[in-house]
Image (spheres, rainbow, N blue to C red):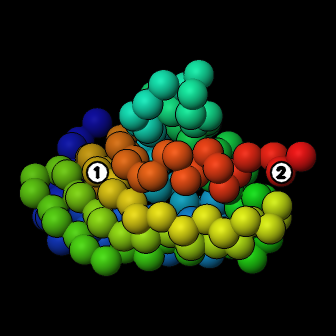
Amino acid sequence: MEVVSMTAEENKQVVRRYFELVSGGRVDEAADLLADDAVQVVPGDPTRMPGAGTHPKAELVAALHGLRDAAPDGIAFTPTTFTAEDDRVAVEGESYGKLANGKIYNTPLHHLFQIRDGKIHSVHEYFDTQHAAEAFADPS
């Protein structure tokens, strides 16, 4: 298979599109931007923070569907800065959404994407895990 060389700007466009689709609740379209062997990495101890660990594409897509379902009006992921070098795109931003449990999910975030052949091969996500655990916790 031929390797497609992309510029840093083209890689940023892939990531921008991913955030647009995820924020718009269009998870299946966002999944099309992921390579078949894509992984999501969320630092942390999975026994203390649900969602922490390394997840293959299917688990990442399931998590995105779960986020969409947890926030009836959606969760907006608003990137504020993009920095790209070689096949990596770093993004700072903020997420905001009112959850079905009545809580507000609002946290700064940082993602580091690796893009190859026009597809996302990995995304490392950094966010306030304590806030996420509290916001998504069952209120009962």
Give the residue at mark 2: 139
Residue 10, given in percent of the width and then of the height, sits at 23, 68
Left or right for 127, reference 61: left
Q: Secondary structure at mark 2?
A: loop
Say which of 110 and 136 sits in front: 136
Say which of 139 and 95 sits in front: 139
Question: Local crowd at mark 1 within 10 Å, few (<14), some, or many (≥20)?
Answer: many
| Mark 1 or mark 2, whichever is nearer to me | 2
Quarter in which the N terminus is drawn:
top left
Residue drawn at the location 82% of the way across and 61% of the way down: 101
Give the residue at mark 1: 112
Query: In the image, is residue 82 above or below residue 121?
Result: below
Q: Secondary structure at mark 1?
A: strand
Question: Local crowd at mark 2 within 10 Å, few (<14), some, or many (≥20)?
Answer: few
Query: In the image, is residue 113 above or below residue 54?
Result: below
Residue drawn at the location 23% of the way across and 70% of the way down: 82
